[in-house]
Amino acid sequence: MRMNDSSPKEIRSADDGGGVLRAIGWLGVVFLGIWTLWCAAYHACSIVTPGEVVAVRQVVERGHRGRPYTATYIKVSYRDHAGGRHEIEETAWHAQPGDARMIRYPSFQPSNGRIDEGVWLIWKPCLFAWLIFGGILGAAAYVRFSIQELKGEPEGGSGQTVR
């Protein structure tokens, strides 16, 4: 049984690299775009208030390799916009009781405060995710188009039929 010569050229695999790379790119852009919008909304709608370190404790913990290290935890007390008092406990490099810390909390949930590290509180992980995603996607696109160039395929990609 003889097959038509044009059939294999017309029927292409869905895994030609271009479509998959494009789909991963768009999914990543949508996900990271939503995350960036959430960061902007959190930063714009949260409230910053002064807090005070009320307690410092050091705990000897074991790392993932079993080596002991000393972790410092501070308890910070702050008042929300309605006058309610809240306490949070977080890790810190160094602190003394009575030290001042700025606390950022969402206006709709005052008990969910975090020590405000400036802009980097929520933007640092988002920025690093964008950089890592862009680097991986850029490297994948570079490799794909370099292979295409070495094979001498047209610019449109391996999914297009050339006659």
Image (cartoon, grey):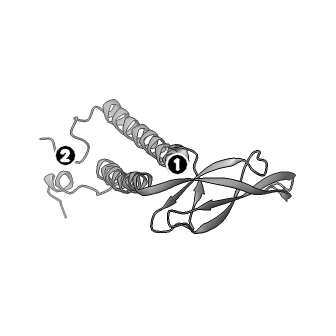
Disc 2 element: loop
Residue drawn at x 57%, y 49% is 116
Residue drawn at x 53%, y 66% is 110
Closest to the observer: 55 or 18? Answer: 55
> Residue 36's x, y, as percent?
39, 51
Q: Residue furthest front?
A: 83
Disc 1 element: helix
Q: Which quadrant of the figure contains the N terminus?
A: bottom left
Q: Earlier in the sequence, mark 2 or mark 1?
A: 1
Locate residue 34: give its quadrant. bottom left
> Residue 18's x, y, as percent?
30, 47
Q: Is residue 151 left or right of residue 161?
A: right
> Residue 101's x, y, as percent?
64, 49
Q: Is residue 10 left or right of residue 91?
A: left
Q: Amino acid at mark 2?
A: Gln
Of marks 2 and 1, the one in the foreground = 1
Q: Which residue is mark 1?
A: 125
Locate residue 155: give its quadrant. top left
Residue 35, numbered circle: none
Q: Which residue is mark 2?
A: 160
> Residue 42's x, y, as percent?
43, 56
Locate residue 83: give its quadrant. bottom right
Vertical relation: 94 (above or below) 60: above
Q: Is residue 150 left or right of residue 120?
A: left
Residue drawn at x 16%, y 46% is 161
Q: Amino acid at mark 1?
A: Pro
Residue drawn at x 75%, y 45% is 93
Q: Residue furthest left?
A: 163
Q: How far separated are the C-alphas under marks 2 and 1?
A: 39 Å
